[in-house]
Amino acid sequence: MDPLRQSPSPSSSQASSPRTLSCERLGYVGIEAVLDQLKIKAMKMGFEFNIMVVGQSGLGKSTMVNTLFKSKIWKSTMPGLRVPTPQTLQLYSMTHVIEENGVKLKLTVTDTPGFGDQINNDKCWDPILGYINEQYERYLQEEILITRQRHIPDTRVHCCIYFVPPTGHCLRPLDLEFLQRLCRAVNVVPVIARADSLTIEEREAFRHRIQDDLKTHSIEVYPQKCFDEDINDKILNSKIRERIPFAVVGADREHMVNGRCVLGRKTKWGIIEVENMAHCEFPLLRDLLIRSHLQDLKDITHNVHYENYRIIRLKESHALPRGPGWVDLAPAPSPAPGPAPTGTRASPGPAKVCRWAEDNSDEDF
Ligand SMILES: Nc1nc2c(ncn2[C@@H]2O[C@H](COP(=O)(O)OP(=O)(O)OP(=O)(O)O)[C@@H](O)[C@H]2O)c(=O)[nH]1
Ligand SMILES: [Mg+2]
């Protein structure tokens, strides 16, 4: 008798696990059409993507938000954007729906107030980590409902851009502490801010020093080595890891250069074009975020960072026994004093959030 067709013995207490059999194909089945189905569904649903900018005051975070919205990918959809960049005093999110060739992207960028200009910068990460955890909590509360929405709105931060001041030396203790906490909660892409204040050689040397600092302090920024899934990921991500932190320049003004309208900063020496790789690495940042790693950033957020949060919250809740399968989520605790222990979420706390959307599409999102 064919061993594969043997039925399990009735006395066996173990449930038989399904077996995967390779069968001879009798003809074209059409399995590949599933790719078209996935594409059509994804186009209908659109993509949500949430970025956050974090760093010391005055490093160009708000300007970078405008640069992101005005750069090539978004320019056509926001032609008249002229937002002045006053000092950011509270955390706020700006949402815009971008449509290109039928693909819709709902991009939300969260701007945060700068830190580091206080005499005591203790816990300056609390409002940022509080906001990140608040979004995980929102998602979790929706997810555990018995009658839940078919599509849970995703406000979780998929990528946090961390602005390093262009000192040219090394990472400051404050940056190290902040990054250590942030990397446990979210995907972090560090950038060298205001890179126009450094020469190309200085940028290179500074980049290597930052990479050494990150390694010495076991800070795993995105793309994390441990999540490379195959050799192709490894090759692509190794190249990116060599270039991180990207040396970026932000600008929200357009200038005429050789008859072309470019986004850039006017200096005594000429125009620094933000989209020109000979001038800065903003295009690498944008391409990483949108063109090459958007889905991966979302996957790691969901499968790793949110999962860590979820496990801890559910474990906390099961400290309250209510019978089998009962999930009763206690409210998230308020910010705890002191640093979060390794591998746990940082202290969640209420963050002052102002959310305004500039959606020009109504359905699906
Ligand atoms: N040289 C140079 N200046 C920049 C750059 N990006 C922004 N700036 C300028 O730096 C100043 C501060 O920029 P913001 O974008 O407001 O800085 P921020 O990090 O949002 O500051 P806070 O809101 O206080 O945290 C503005 O005058 C910007 O024009 C850059 O890449 N290079
Ligand atoms: Mg600002």
Image: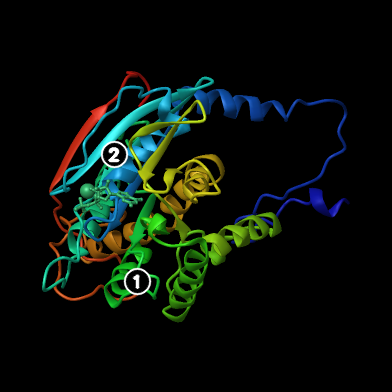
Return the residue at label 1.
180
The residue singled out by tag 2 in the image is: 146
Quadrant of the rendering where the C terminus is positioned: top left
Residue 177, horizontal then vertical, whole percent: 29, 74
State left or right for residue 256 relative to residue 148.
right
Which kind of residue does numbered mark 1 sit on? Answer: Gln
Q: Residue at x 47, y 53 (%)?
A: 300
Foreground of the two, 63 or 220:
63
Tag nearer the camera, 1 or 2? 1
Closest to the observer, 174 or 194: 194
Which circle marks residue 277 in the picture?
none
Q: Is residue 96 above or below residue 93?
A: above
Q: Earlier in the sequence, mark 1 or mark 2?
A: 2
Seen at 50% across and 51% down, the residue is: 281
Whether pointer 1 and pointer 2 mark residues with C-beta atoms closer than 8 Å, the reply is no
Tell me if 346 is positioned left or right of 352 in this view. right
Q: Mark 2 belongs to which amino acid?
A: Ile
Q: Residue furthest bottom?
A: 216
* Colour setup of the view: rainbow
Mark 2 packing: few (<14 Cα in 10 Å), some, or many (20+)? few
| Residue 325 screen position, x and y as percent | 31, 54
Left or right, 208 with respect to 114, comes to right
Q: Badge 1 local density, few (<14 within 10 Å), some, or many (20+)?
A: some
- Identified at 16% across, 58% down, the residue is 349
Which residue sits at x=37%, y=43%? 265
Q: CA distance from mark 1 to mark 2?
A: 36 Å
Could you tell me which secondary element the residue under label 1 belongs to? helix
Q: Position of residue 97 (x, y in %)?
A: 37, 27
